[in-house]
Image: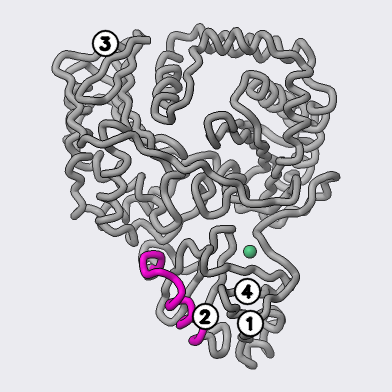
Amino acid sequence: MERTEIDGVPVLWAAGPAPLSAALVFGCGARDETFRSIGVTHLVEHLAMGTLPRVHHERNAAVDLELTAFTATGRPEQIVDFLDGVCRALAALPLDRIGKEAGVLAAEGGHCAHPSVEGLLHQRFGAQGPGLAPLVGPGFDRIAPEMVSGHAARFFVAGNAVLILTGPPPQGLRLPLPPGPRAAHPVPVPLPTSGPIWFNGVVPEVGLSLLGRRDAAWRLGMGVLAERMERVARHQHGLSYDVGGDVTLVDADRRLYSITVDAREGQEGAVARLLWAELRRLADEGPTEAELAEECAAARELHDDPRTVEAELLEAAAAELFGLPYTPSAERLAERATVTPEDVSRRLREALDTVQLVVPPEVRVELSGLAEGGCRRSREEPTGRVFRPPLLAKLITRDARGLRLILTDDGVALRDPDGDVHLVRFSEVVGVEEDGAERTVFGRHGCHVPVDPVLFRGAEAVVRAVDAAVPAELRYPRSALTPAD
Ligand SMILES: [Zn+2]
């Protein structure tokens, strides 16, 4: 891997198969947003790409949890033009086009990770950092121009970029980005939990995550678990088709490992039981030597494929942007070869307490050792002023009878028809949506409380309290782009 620098941007390159591919990578992803600014990174990307002239070579851009990449493949002069255009656009974003792009983005939808992984991240981190992944937030039309320019000025600068190329830098290549330093990223802090849980999430597939470390034994262990799930759930029981894996950066050393397994309609509970059982078996007994050898052989195959040059360059770019050590592929292979079955089982055993398992809505499971989790709710009503539905509503619907809105000294709470109480303290508010006389208060722990004078008699007083307690920059009118509810 070669290294040079152009206009203050580190350039990493290695010879790969023709034609030339380039990716201008920024240390900025969905986890760098806040609830209030969800989607701003994607908006920056669309505004920049939207300024480029029509071309016939391959080009694209994508935002994931951690990185934004502008990519192109073509003749050297095409790559030069593309990168010049992207950099100039990022230096002077067409903010007047926000309204138009907001509509396009709302229509596009899109995910920055597997939807079940997003659900797992939200459960673990709440409405902050990586936990924002599955949320829509206030909507693209509620992102103000100064939020876009502020985000671009902080993240889309020369010091926070790395260019990767599958060949030497072409003649005349310039990267005229605005100057600026490498961005710092807060370390995501998991919400407090009392042990391993399962929960219902708005997810399409069963998934499981656990906190591990950045090392070869972890990678191998999760690879073996995926293989076993494929063998057991798919081939033996015919319950599922697809097994996926994901790794999320927590800090320099820690990683969140996720595995997702789809299920035939109605078999989600059975797949969840198998997944939990196989993980525990692997933690108890460890993998076999043959399984470890299989994983190493698969990694070697990938290492030898010339097309992996790009993935390897991206790995090095990410390490550079996050200030992490980069271990070249050959060294990683050597590390893998030294891993023993006991190394894997010890790591998994130590991490079992951090397991969170998600099943789609309405699926009920009994899993020994896993308590039911979900949003932070309790059975105890806090002290405060209580608001109830109007009498008529209570006569008509059974649900309305148990419903209460409670205004406490430092927040609002909702008692739902099941008797669960969801409390959002004002200090934990990440956003308040305004819809006429109604407010929806979103909390950092993932709960939200509807403050609706139609739903609760006298709730105008709660609306006033919310408006007085929550800073103006966290309040926004309901998006015109999302359908009601
Ligand atoms: Zn809740």
Name the residue carrying label 4: 414
Quadrant showing the N terminus: top left
| 285 or 362, nearer to the observer | 285
Name the residue carrying label 3: 168
The x, y position of residue 429, in whole percent, is 50, 64
Q: Which one is closest to the eye, mark 2 or mark 1?
A: 1
The residue segment tinted magenta is 460-475
Name the residue carrying label 2: 452
- Position of 186 with respect to 338 (left or right) is left
Q: Main secondary structure of the magenta part?
A: helix
Q: Could you tell me the amino acid type at mark 2?
A: Asp
- Position of 308 with respect to 141 (left or right) is right
Marked residue nearer the N-terminal end (2 or 3): 3
Q: Secondary structure at mark 1?
A: loop
Q: Could you tell me the amino acid type at mark 4?
A: Leu
Instruction: Please state the quadrant of the image where ligand 1 appears.
Output: bottom right
Magenta highlight on residue 195:
no
Q: Could you tell me the amino acid type at mark 3?
A: Pro
Q: Are marks 1 and 3 in contact (CB under 8 Å)?
A: no
Q: Which one is closest to the eye, mark 1 or mark 4?
A: 1
Q: Secondary structure at mark 2?
A: loop
Q: Secondary structure at mark 3?
A: loop
C-alpha span from label 2 to label 1: 17 Å
